[in-house]
Image: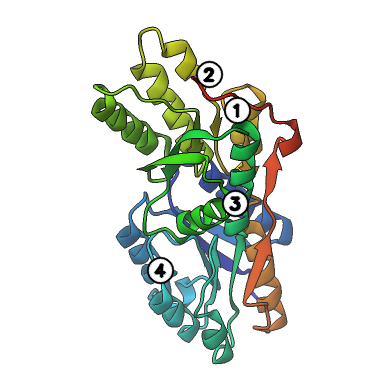
Amino acid sequence: MSKLRFLVSLITRENDYQVEQAAAALAAAKEIGVDADIVYADNDPITQSTQVLKAIQAEPSQRPNGIIVEPLGATAFPQAAQAAVSAGIGWAVLSRRADYAPKLGQSSRSPVFSVSVDQVEVGRIQARQVMALLPRGGSVLFIQGPSVSSVSQERQEGLMELLPGSVHLTNLRGRWTEESAHQSVCSWFKLMTAQKVRIDLVLAQNDVMGMGARKAIEETVTGPDRDDWLEIPITGVDGVPKTGQAWVTGGKLAATVIVPPSSGKALRLMAEALWKGSSSIAEHIYTSPAAFPEIAKLTPKSPKG
């Protein structure tokens, strides 16, 4: 059998976790002796769909043996998945469930599956972090990912499951990048200039959006309240060692949730299935998130009076 080739389709280069996904896929490919091509959609679902369909519709000799995609839009590309397996290409989805996998897998000789962290549990961990940092409750600026993102929706589901009524959320949206959160928080500050706003914690659905919020606070807040704003704890998600975990260790973030990269696992599973000529992979594989630091080590913050 010739050397296996995989296409790994990711969301954006402007996100540390996506870069970590790329690195994990390339490391796994090197380890097991296959090729992996990484493409980024630049936060555009149409670009991502075009990239994937171009690979599926290429001449047979140019097609990848498998496609691993972290979907950007509201769906996990069911039509593209059908086209891929019809062309004899394996298909794996990252970071969310592919609800069509069971039915599609039954009629396919190619592996069809998904690998993700338990996103609802990520939200539960974030709730526990908030409760540890604000034991008496308080006001939280909540920066979510795109409204169409199932990742954002499931993290919010887990958060709201445990968050007590003493915690009050102000919701903003970002696009998983530092710049998008920076713009969102700056715009919010402009709207709030005439009001006496109190925020006790910033809760971001990923680390780089948390850092974007920090940048907006540093650039925008002046006057006697500036020191109080700069001391507000900021939490995030992803926990990449060189970014999220380092930001926590350096005091820029109060906490994060470590989300193990899923691309390497998906690539290994698909390669093994293709080598064996088997499509029998579990329809969905979960990985486990972890709080960083341990929740018991968080120092409670008192709401400002």
Q: CA distance from mark 3 to mark 2?
A: 25 Å
N-terminal of the pair, mark 2 or mark 4, is 4
Quick check: marks 3 and 1 in contact, CB under 8 Å?
A: no
Residue holding disc 2: 231
Q: CA distance from mark 2 to mark 1?
A: 15 Å
User: How far from the left and from the top, in percent, is residue 84?
Assistant: 46, 78
Residue 104's mark?
A: none
Query: Quick check: 80 left or right of 263?
Result: left
Residue depth check, mark 4 versus mark 3: number of the one nearer the observer: 3
- How packed mark 4 is, by other alpha carbons closer than 10 Å (few <14, some 14-19, many 20 or more), is some
- How packed mark 3 is, by other alpha carbons closer than 10 Å (few <14, some 14-19, many 20 or more), is some
Q: Residue furthest bottom?
A: 107
N-terminal of the pair, mark 3 or mark 2, is 3
Residue 162's mark?
A: 3
Q: Quadrant of residue 126?
A: top right
State the SS at label 4: loop
Q: CA distance from mark 1 to mark 4?
A: 32 Å
N-terminal of the pair, mark 2 or mark 1, is 2
- How packed mark 1 is, by other alpha carbons closer than 10 Å (few <14, some 14-19, many 20 or more), is many
- How packed mark 2 is, by other alpha carbons closer than 10 Å (few <14, some 14-19, many 20 or more), is few
